[in-house]
Image (spheres, rainbow, N blue to C red):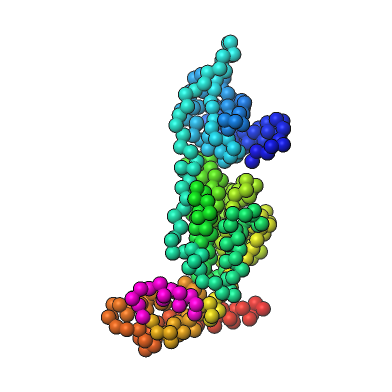
Amino acid sequence: MQRDEETDSDRAARVATAWATVRDGLRKDVGARSFDHWLSGIRLGDYCPSDRAVALVLPSAFMANWVNSNFADRLTLGWRAALPEVQSVRIVAEEAGDGERYVAPELPIEPVAALVPSFRFDPRLDFARFVVGDANRIACNAGRQFADDGPMRFNPLFIHSATGQGKTHLLHAIGHATLARKPGARALAMSAERFMVDFVNAMRAKDTIAFKARLRSVDLLMIDDFQFIAGKETTQEEFLYTIDELVQGGKRLVISADRSPHQLDGVEGRILSRLTQGLVVDIQPADYPLRRAIVASKAAAMPGVAIPEVVLDMLAARIASNVRELEGGLNRLVAYAALNARGIDEAFAEDVLGEMFRASRRRVTIDEIQKRVSD
């Protein structure tokens, strides 16, 4: 980020550091032999802050044309990832004879913004439909504040809970609120597994520059199920660089997992340190009042479906394992009623959901035993 008080020497140092990063990325992508043969002769030219353009100089017009035809897009993406204020790259040649400079014709390069369209968040998963109770109030308030237009009080935001307690809903709600606040913002949500697969594919294709530019040019990045990168050393290294680039660039980062950062075995300490420097919040298992409010909210959103209050009481009381299963039980009950063309009452709910009731009871009992043993 450019600063008003920055001197020319400070700016030159930043640009030189970014160029070193771009060169290292190219060498890794194309291999040492190709880099040394075609790209090692590139030297850094002038940087024009008003045009947000940097010049790269080659020793001949032939080399400039070849690099422009084969590497212009990678060089541009590399610069935007290493120094986002750089928006274009001019590839020029300086002939040794009279010092006249040849400028290679510019190729149309797709802007990073076009490469990273905003993620399509589930329209059903917003803050208006996120039912709040004692178990999730802090996490919900943190998510709302994180998506606000004011100064960031914490970054990244780390949300953890057991499976099915509302983490994914909260991530989508943060995304909706961010885009509503700033419609032109670029938001991207992905699972940690998708992050890993995309990164591995980029390495195999020797094109990690585009992968890095895609992630680091967003305004909001959200990673779900972070626990899946435990033990993946190469992926963790790239994730660490991504965290640093986003946070230092004033971008927002939200991460979710099924356990707290300190319980993430197989994740290196530098990443854990970055995760805990922001705000860590948890979502506790939903208690009965929250489960009852959730099932009532879901039932109210089903037009033409009549569910007695006593049946809603039954669902909330007897499916206590997690919110996802509670919603699944309600959906199953409504579907079976429609398929059988009959109304919903306690006997019908017991008949349709009896096995789910028993499974939830067994699961809660086992969880309670394990918790007491660990305590």
Position above or below: 123 against 291: above
Picture coordinates of residue 131 (x, y %)? 51, 71
Q: Is residue 322 visible?
A: yes
Name the side, left or right, on which 99 lies relative to 114. right
Position above or below: 88 against 294: above
Picture coordinates of residue 221 (x, y %)? 55, 53
Picture coordinates of residue 367 (x, y %)? 56, 78
Position above or below: 76 against 222: above
Q: Is residue 296 magenta?
A: yes
Position above or below: 170 against 197: below
Q: Quadrant of the C terminus?
A: bottom right
Q: Is residue 237 visible?
A: no
What's the magenta bit mostly, secondary-structure-wise? helix
Picture coordinates of residue 226 (x, y %)? 56, 59
- Name the residue at 29% across, 83% down: 342
Magenta segment boundaries in residue numbering: 292-306
- Name the residue at 57% across, 62% down: 144
- Name the residue at 53% across, 25% down: 91
Q: Residue furthest top?
A: 98
- Name the residue at 64% across, 53% down: 151
Q: Residue furthest bottom?
A: 347
Q: Is residue 18 magenta?
A: no
Viewer-proximal residue among 315 and 98: 315
Viewer-proximal residue among 370 and 226: 226
Q: Quadrant of the N terminus?
A: top right
